[in-house]
Amino acid sequence: MKTELREIGRERAQKAQGFIGRAWPALCRLRLFAAIVIVLTPSWAAAQPQPRPFAWKLPGGFPRPRVPEDNRMSWEKIELGRFLFYDTRLSGNETQACASCHQQESAFTDNLQVGVGSTGELHPRNSMSLTNVAYGSTLSWANPILLSLEQQALVPMFGEQPVELGLAGLEDVLLERLEADSRYRRLFHEAFPADVEPIIVGNIVKAIATFDRTLISGNSALDRYALGLDDNAISESARRGINLFFGEKFECFHCHGGFNRSDHVMSANSPFIEAPFHNDQLYNIDGDGAYPPNNTGIFEFTRDPNDMGRFKAPTLRNIELTAPYMHDGSIATLEEVLEHYAAGGRVIEEGPYAGDGSEVPERLKSGFIRGFEMSTREQEDMLALLRSMTDLEFTTNPRFSDPFPGRLCPGDCDFSGGITVDELVTGINMALGDATLAWCVGFDESGEGRVSVDELVTNINFALAGCPAGE
């Protein structure tokens, strides 16, 4: 009976391609069908819904990211991870989410000098952008042993020095919060179908890591120019900036080359991990290259004096959006960043961190920060190039956005601005239990973990009338 009803509904939906001009007859048929299938369909938990097939769709020149064998990509895990990423229930006091320090409009950073945890504690370092984090060979400013996104997710959740999300000792409370949510019960069940009890900490970090791996940015003006898609995508000033970037005077390309504009890159094709760390000559507190005691770079882990002040070179993609700069947010603007490198080190005249960074011992210098003369035009050309690396499609992509407020047109599964017959059929299949919520989680506007008759009817009405203006 269930199969027959589904086929009847599919046939009717296909015949209704021109239903906008015949609103009421089509609406009545689909409303009646939706009511019948919901009444006669068993609950989703008893069904075996079809997963949504996943395939990488990468920008030109991008290799496939490396993915752990025990956490394969799936749309079900991606959608679960997106909800968890934006959910304040993932902090001890329910005031912050991952997205609090990694905001999409700022290329998934927060534009603060240093991070601020859920308890108000200031962090020693700046919140890193998550732009193309799937390609990071290490995943923090200065932790050479943090190599996977799954490991990384545990740090803000349960770390205590500093406190970020503040979940240490509250693991059971976190799981109880998620267990009480019917939508999460379905999302976890569909993301981890082999697990009898899928709502566990291990699966939480796997889902967040899977969502993080989709945060791929590769459609900046510079990309379009470099790929030959638009010869006029960047200005003449930015073109001159390219020559400076790859020249031996500015030396930028050594630490910020490659498709991801960073020398910390790993992909599925990488034969080994590349993870160099660099001293930017920002501090020289004692005349021997000392950095502030809570920010010593990888020296904190290696205790090797030659590692004092060595930090990761972040990607330059979307760099225009991620101010302030450096590991401690101590440089406010891109103009000042360029001036710092031109000076070959920062001079701090007074205070506890006073010193001349250009005079750090040779053993600490990167070799690429020697200082150089920079004209006003050269600075403007470099700024034009850096700004051409901004990808506004990335910072507005609805697939990376907060899923909780709900969409004006929830059944618009592909975010095209309208609801098609195929999308209505998807909603019906979800109601039948033949498709997972990941096919179009917007249909479950109520957050109950299922698609109801009312939700189907709402989206049928939107399909007939068109999505609200501004969608």
Image (cartoon, rainbow, N blue to C red):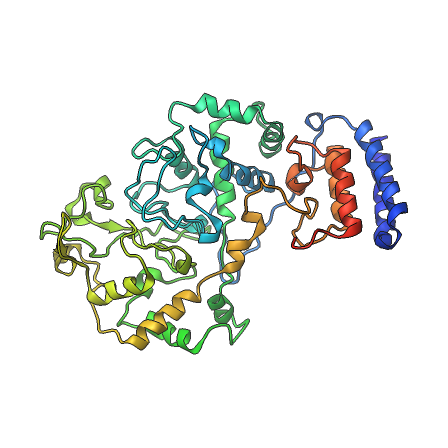
| Image quarter of the N terminus | top right
Of residues 460 and 369, the one nearer the viewer is: 460
Q: Quadrant of residue 47?
A: top right
User: Is any part of residue 434 visible from this angle?
Assistant: no
Q: Residue at x 20, y 66 (%)?
A: 343
Outermost residue, left side: 287
Residue for point 74% across, 40% down = 427
* Residue at x 40%, y 37% (from the top left corner): 151
The relative height of residue 385 versus residue 426 in the rendered view (above or below) is below
Give x and y (percent) for residue 278: 25, 54
Does 1 appear above or below 303? above
Residue 390 falls left or right of residue 418: left
* Residue drawn at x 42%, y 23% as measured from the top left: 170
The answer to whether residue 333 is above or below residue 135 is below
Q: Nearer the viewer, residue 423 or 202?
A: 423
Left or right: 349 as drawn, with respect to 457: left
Give x and y (percent) for residue 285: 13, 50
Asked whether residue 371 is in view, the answer is yes
What percent of the width, then of the height, locates residue 468? 70, 51
Question: Which residue reaches farthest right?
Answer: 25
Q: Residue furthest front?
A: 469
Left or right of residue 57, residue 27 in this image: right
Residue 92, given in percent of the width and then of the height, sits at: 42, 28
